[in-house]
């Protein structure tokens, strides 16, 4: 087997694995979206445990920030949600209020007054 045949075989394997991962990711995402659309909106008491920001690289020159917050519910369950920049700036760890969620999707958070 010559070097070109080996390179073609390696490329084919990586291409196939990459394509399979993309398909699996798309199927998983579409299942989550479908599940969320059929879930009811739930409003419940929650407390902000923490918040964080990650940079998501769109290209070599551009990164988009993603904002997350971890909430603790009355049942002592904890969950992390991706939130908007406005909500990220608005909340602080220790804040209590009412969270609105739909499945795994964060809808909003209102502080107790």
Image: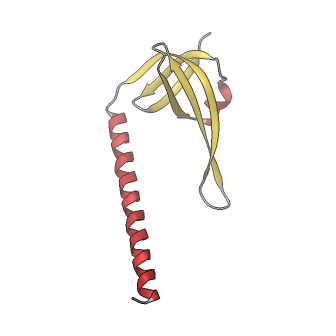
Scheme of colours in the image: secondary structure
| 104 relative to 49 in the view: left or right | left
Of 59 and 73, the residue lying toward us: 73
When asked about the image quadrant of residue 40, the answer is top left
Residue 27 placement (x, y as % from top left): 34, 50
Question: Residue pushed farthest top?
Answer: 113
| Count of numbered circles on the image | 0
At 33% across and 36% down in the image, what residue appears? 35
Question: Residue pushed farthest front?
Answer: 1
| 76 relative to 30 in the view: left or right | right
At 63% across and 17% down in the image, what residue appears? 95
- The image shows residue 100, relative to residue 96, as above or below, that is below
| 107 relative to 55 in the view: left or right | left
When asked about the image quadrant of residue 52, the answer is top right
Residue 91 placement (x, y as % from top left): 65, 24
At 65% across and 22% down in the image, what residue appears? 93
- The image shows residue 106, relative to residue 26, as above or below, that is above
At 47% across and 20% down in the image, what residue appears? 77
- The image shows residue 89, relative to residue 24, as above or below, that is above
Quadrant into which the N terminus falls: bottom left
Of 67 and 109, the residue lying toward us: 67
Of 78 and 23, the residue lying toward us: 78
Residue 18 placement (x, y as % from top left): 42, 64
Quadrant into which the C terminus falls: top right
Residue 2 placement (x, y as % from top left): 43, 90
């Amino acid at each position: 087997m010559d070097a070109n045949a080996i390179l073609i075989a390696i490329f084919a394997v990586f291409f196939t694995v990459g394509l399979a991962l993309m398909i699996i990711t798309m199927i998983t995402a579409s299942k989550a979206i479908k599940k969320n659309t059929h879930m009811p909106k739930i409003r419940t008491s929650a407390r902000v445990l923490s918040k964080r920001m990650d940079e998501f690289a769109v290209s070599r020159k551009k990164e988009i920030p993603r904002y997350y917050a971890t909430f603790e519910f009355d049942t002592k369950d904890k969950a992390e949600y991706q939130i908007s920049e406005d909500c990220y700036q608005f909340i602080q760890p220790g804040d209590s209020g009412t969270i609105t969620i739909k499945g795994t999707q964060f809808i909003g958070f209102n502080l107790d007054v």
